[in-house]
Image: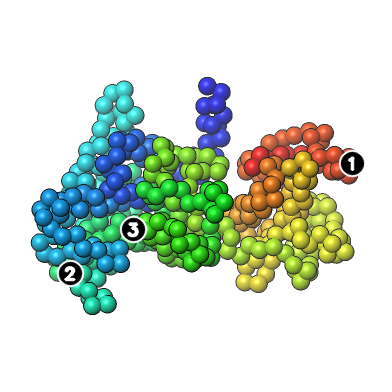
């Protein structure tokens, strides 16, 4: 019971942060066939109840393949895309339709004593996707396999404003009345881009991405994704496809893309309502413009922190001290201008680090940039083997508490820091477990 209470209280800030946001959730046909699919539906209903605007994009690859096999049709794939001819298309429509109906039926449940009781969800689907044929590429005619031409974002937003869940299938319609078989990845990415969704959440059949040392990869920038795709020949075909999808969405303005292992029970809830999550986050917010400081940045740092030193928010640092400690600093840069800084001083013998000299240019406060810088430094701390961070502050206590720092006593400081504590300044101590 105590663990539940602790988790529920910690989830509060995330509930508030996600309310009113638009999330596109993508899952494949294998998820629909899984015995855990009703649990996923329950989790989606809970997200809707918490005020999250949901667009669901489903796949149907295994169902379509089974239909084609049962009909004695050949399965033909080129560059990961299935060729769809006129004989295949009716079978594709049947398979996709059955999957869509199953999802709608589960979202309509309201049985007493079940997680769906009282949900009263409205599910909307329709001709919201305009498609065009892939045509002939490298000598291959893809026939009725197509790609997204346009998403009717206005109609989707109107339905979301009415608290409906929008369900999109991997079929699209051309202005001439033709139907095209689409990939769920293409539909989900185009939808997230058209809506400028706050998140694109991809439930993958592949395991969680891991580094070469076996540790799960929790955060990636677009540059990291490019390097990973170039260097890792061991990635599964699906993982590579989803990474390229995330890269496209991120560069088109979708702020955050989460790759989740669908087999993890409650993966959506764990990713959205816990501090560390269970998937891989791809976003430009975290690393774009973030970098370690160099000696050439001294002037920019001094200009940034001087107003905060003048009003007593920060302790004064001389140019000489900055030059000696410059390797401790991380910077947030925009168009060649330093707009944020943060320093990390490790105490490895106690596996703790001090977060210091936190500063953001006034015009960029309350924009999420300080959080991005904090996550960047937290990652550095973990890489150095630190498992806790502490901060001394006189005026920003609430900001740090809202980001997981908890009040601590001065005597909780590392011994070397305790000796230097300024009792006249009377800074408050806060500690965060990484």
Q: Disc 3 or 2, which lies upstream in sequence?
A: 2
Residue 325 placed where, x, y %? 81, 59
Instruction: In the rendered view, tell whether residue 299 sits above or below residue 420.
Output: below
**Residue 81 is drawn in which quadrant?**
bottom left
Q: Residues within 10 Å of mark 2 (few under 14, many from 20)?
A: some
Provide the secondary structure element on which disc 1 rests.
helix
Cα gap from disc 1 to disc 2, whole angstroms: 75 Å
Residue beneath the point at 30% across and 63% down:
80
Q: Which residue is mark 2?
A: 143
Q: Nearer the viewer, residue 36 or 105?
A: 36
Q: Nearer the viewer, residue 378 or 17?
A: 378
Provide the secondary structure element on which disc 2 rests.
loop
Residue 114 placed where, x, y %? 31, 26
Q: Which residue is mark 3?
A: 185
Q: Which residue is mark 1?
A: 419
Residue 171 placed where, x, y %? 22, 58
Provide the secondary structure element on which disc 3 rests.
helix
Q: Disc 1 or 2, which lies upstream in sequence?
A: 2
């Amino acid at each position: 019971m105590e663990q539940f209470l602790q988790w529920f209280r910690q989830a509060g800030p995330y509930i508030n942060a996600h309310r009113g946001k638009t999330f596109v959730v993508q899952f494949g046909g294998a998820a629909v066939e899984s015995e855990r699919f009703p649990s996923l539906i329950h989790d989606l209903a809970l997200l809707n109840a918490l005020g999250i605007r949901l667009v669901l994009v489903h796949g149907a690859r295994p169902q379509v393949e089974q239909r084609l096999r049962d009909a004695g049709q050949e399965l033909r794939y080129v560059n990961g895309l299935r060729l769809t001819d006129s004989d295949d298309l009716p079978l594709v429509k049947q398979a996709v339709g059955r999957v869509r109906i199953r999802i709608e039926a589960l979202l309509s449940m309201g049985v007493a004593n079940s997680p769906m009781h009282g949900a009263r969800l409205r599910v909307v689907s329709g001709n919201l996707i305009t498609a065009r044929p892939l045509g002939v590429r490298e000598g291959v005619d893809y026939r009725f396999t197509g790609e997204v031409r346009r998403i009717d974002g206005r109609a989707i937003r109107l339905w979301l404003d009415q608290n409906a869940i929008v369900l999109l299938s991997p079929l699209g319609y051309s202005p001439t009345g033709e139907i095209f078989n689409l990939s769920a990845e293409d539909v989900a990415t185009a939808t997230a881009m058209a809506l400028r969704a706050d998140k694109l959440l991809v439930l993958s059949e592949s395991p969680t991405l891991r580094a070469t040392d076996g540790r799960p990869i929790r955060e990636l920038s677009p540059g990291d994704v490019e390097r990973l795709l170039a260097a890792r020949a061991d990635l599964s075909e699906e993982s590579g496809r989803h990474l390229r999808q995330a890269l496209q969405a991120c560069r088109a303005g979708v702020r955050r893309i989460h790759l989740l292992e669908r087999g993890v029970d409650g993966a959506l809830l764990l990713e959205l309502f816990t501090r560390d999550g269970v998937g891989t986050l791809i976003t430009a917010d975290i690393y774009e413009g973030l970098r370690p400081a160099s000696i050439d940045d001294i002037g920019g740092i001094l200009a940034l922190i001087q107003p905060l030193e003048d009003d007593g928010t920060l302790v004064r640092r001389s140019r000489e001290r900055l030059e000696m400690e410059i390797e401790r600093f991380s910077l947030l840069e925009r168009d060649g201008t330093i707009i944020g800084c943060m320093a990390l001083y490790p105490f490895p013998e106690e596996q703790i680090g001090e977060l210091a000299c936190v500063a953001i240019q006034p015009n960029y406060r309350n924009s999420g940039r300080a959080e991005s810088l904090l996550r960047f430094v937290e990652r550095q701390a973990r890489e150095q083997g630190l498992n806790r961070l502490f901060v001394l502050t006189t005026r920003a206590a609430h900001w740090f508490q809202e980001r997981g720092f908890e009040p601590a006593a001065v005597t909780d400081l590392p011994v070397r820091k305790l000796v230097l504590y300024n009792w006249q300044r009377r800074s408050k101590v806060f500690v965060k477990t990484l």
